[in-house]
Image (cartoon, helix red, strand yellow):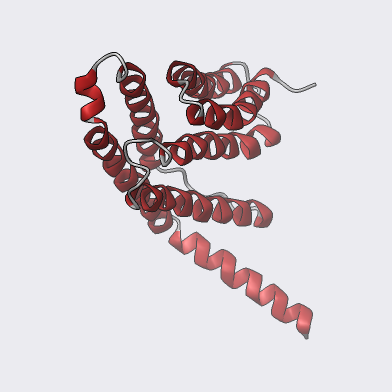
């Protein structure tokens, strides 16, 4: 049976496509509710895992996956926001988030396969804080926009005002992760190439 932290993590994964559907249907308050569940379960699964010693190999695998899938689902949906979807910039901004998470996830998987421990970075926490806060702020304002025309008029500026810092911090956190672990990454790659060379011989 899955432990509570893993159950909370899986909730995030399962709700991700539901969020996209709600956003496309312009059910702004419901989408905001799902996003709040994302952030709450992200906090709670880690808390319960540490507090009650429920840390597991499965949890270490699916927790970062659920973080990436849930938040990327939100940002992907944001590219369809009616006030900015005609612009090319939302897709380019979200592409930056996608590339960063894909590269870091691949390196983590490679490290796990070789038994290498890579150092976590404070910038990863900063990235999560910026992304989570940006998501909640934008969705709250988007939900209020139909009631307050002033907010609706400013939505494109609000969108870019939130997304630009989120992307900058996210890309920075990826660069910081690579920089801090570069020696280990090179050592892993070198060891892997040496092992394959021995096999060829």
Q: Is residue 32 above or below residue 194?
A: above
Location of the N terminus by quadrant is top right
Residue 25 location (% of width, % of height): 51, 26
Q: Residue at x 43, y 52 (%)?
A: 95
Q: Residue at x 42, y 57 (%)?
A: 178
Q: Is residue 182 left or right of residue 60?
A: left
Corner quadrant of residue 167: top left
Q: Is residue 30 left or right of residue 17?
A: left
Q: Is residue 95 above or below residue 2?
A: below
Closest to the observer: 34 or 143? 143
Q: Residue at x 53, y 25 (%)?
A: 22
Q: Residue at x 30, y 20 (%)?
A: 145
Residue 70 location (% of width, % of height): 53, 33
Corner quadrant of residue 197: bottom right
Residue, far right: 1
Location of the C terminus by quadrant is bottom right
Residue, far top: 147
Residue 123 location (% of width, % of height): 36, 42
- The number of numbered discs placed on residues in the rendered structure image is 0
Residue 54 location (% of width, % of height): 66, 22
């Amino acid at each position: 049976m899955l432990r509570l932290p893993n159950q909370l993590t899986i909730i995030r994964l399962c709700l991700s496509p539901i969020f996209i559907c709600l956003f496309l249907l312009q059910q702004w308050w419901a989408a905001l509710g799902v996003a709040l569940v994302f952030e709450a379960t992200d906090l709670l699964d880690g808390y319960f895992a540490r507090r009650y010693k429920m840390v597991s190999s499965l949890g270490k695998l699916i927790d970062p996956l659920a973080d990436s899938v849930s938040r990327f689902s939100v940002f992907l949906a944001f590219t369809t926001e009616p006030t900015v979807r005609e612009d090319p910039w939302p897709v380019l901004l979200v592409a930056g988030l996608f590339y960063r998470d894909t590269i870091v996830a691949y390196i983590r998987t490679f490290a796990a396969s070789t038994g290498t421990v890579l150092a976590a970075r404070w910038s990863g926490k900063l990235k999560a804080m910026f992304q989570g806060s940006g998501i909640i702020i934008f969705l709250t304002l988007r939900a209020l926009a139909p009631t307050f025309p002033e907010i609706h008029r400013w939505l494109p500026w609000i969108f870019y005002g939130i997304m630009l810092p989120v992307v900058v911090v996210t890309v920075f956190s990826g660069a910081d992760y690579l920089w801090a672990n570069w020696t280990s990454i090179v050592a892993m790659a070198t060891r892997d190439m040496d092992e394959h060379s021995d096999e060829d011989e």
